[in-house]
Amino acid sequence: MTSEYIKPIPIIQTWTEQFWKAAKEHKLLIQVCEDCQTRIFYPKKVCPECWSSNLTWEEASGKGKVYSFSVMQDMVEPKFWADIPYVLAMVDLEEGIRLMTRIVACDPEAVEIDMEVEVVFEDITKDCALPFFKPAA
Ligand SMILES: [Zn+2]
């Protein structure tokens, strides 16, 4: 966590503010439609199933499994060169949400499809933390 952070920082929108505020407190939130109970990710202004704007939030367990992944070795945006090799992954949460993330705190060679993972937050600035995933304890 330094002021020299050079990688992209999320742009906070009114409908994503709660998500990022919780992330800063190291909590992973999922939007829920109060009218049809659909769980929604990423945060939206209206439910993609019924167009209701009656949306609320629930805290996710933070547990999931790797659905797919790729080990980035080359050909990435120069701001990410220092991170190579790193793992970009799609993780399926227990709550039925699939999200794009990174797998951290393990050798990229050890990552496997269906590997159990859990959320971990990286504080990138004083106001922002990103949800990544690590092998489940
Ligand atoms: Zn809905």
Image (cartoon, rainbow, N blue to C red):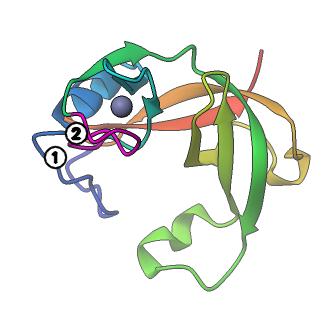
Residue at mark 1: C-beta within 8 A of ligand 1: no
**The quarter of the displayed image where residue 119 is located:** top right
Q: Amino acid at mark 2?
A: Thr
- Image point (68%, 37%), residue name: 92
Total residue callouts? 2
Q: Secondary structure at mark 1?
A: loop
Q: Position of residue 4 (x, y in %)?
A: 24, 56
Rendered-image quadrant of the N terminus? top left
- Image point (87%, 38%), residue name: 114
Rendered-image quadrant of the C terminus? top right
Of all residues, the one furthest to the left in this rendering is 14
Q: Secondary structure at mark 2?
A: loop
Q: Position of residue 90 (x, y in %)?
A: 66, 50
Q: What numbered label is drawn on residue 123?
A: none
**Is 130 situated above or below 34?**
below
Of all residues, the one furthest to the bottom in this rendering is 75
Q: Position of residue 76 (x, y in %)?
A: 56, 79
Label 2 to label 1: alpha-carbon separation: 6 Å
**The quarter of the displayed image where residue 33 is located:** top left
Q: Position of residue 59 (x, y in %)?
A: 42, 14
**Is 53 situated above or below 80?**
above
Quick check: 84 left or right of 59?
right
Between 100 and 15, the residue placed more toward the observer is: 15
**The quarter of the displayed image where residue 2 is located:** top left
Disc 2 and disc 1 in contact, CB within 8 angstroms: yes
Give the residues in magenta. 44-52
Q: Nearer the viewer, mark 2 or mark 1?
A: 2
Q: Is residue 48 magenta?
A: yes
Label 1: which residue? 12
Q: Amino acid at mark 1?
A: Ile
Residues packed near mark 2 inside 10 Å, few (<14), some (14 to 19) or many (20 plus): some
Label 2: which residue? 16
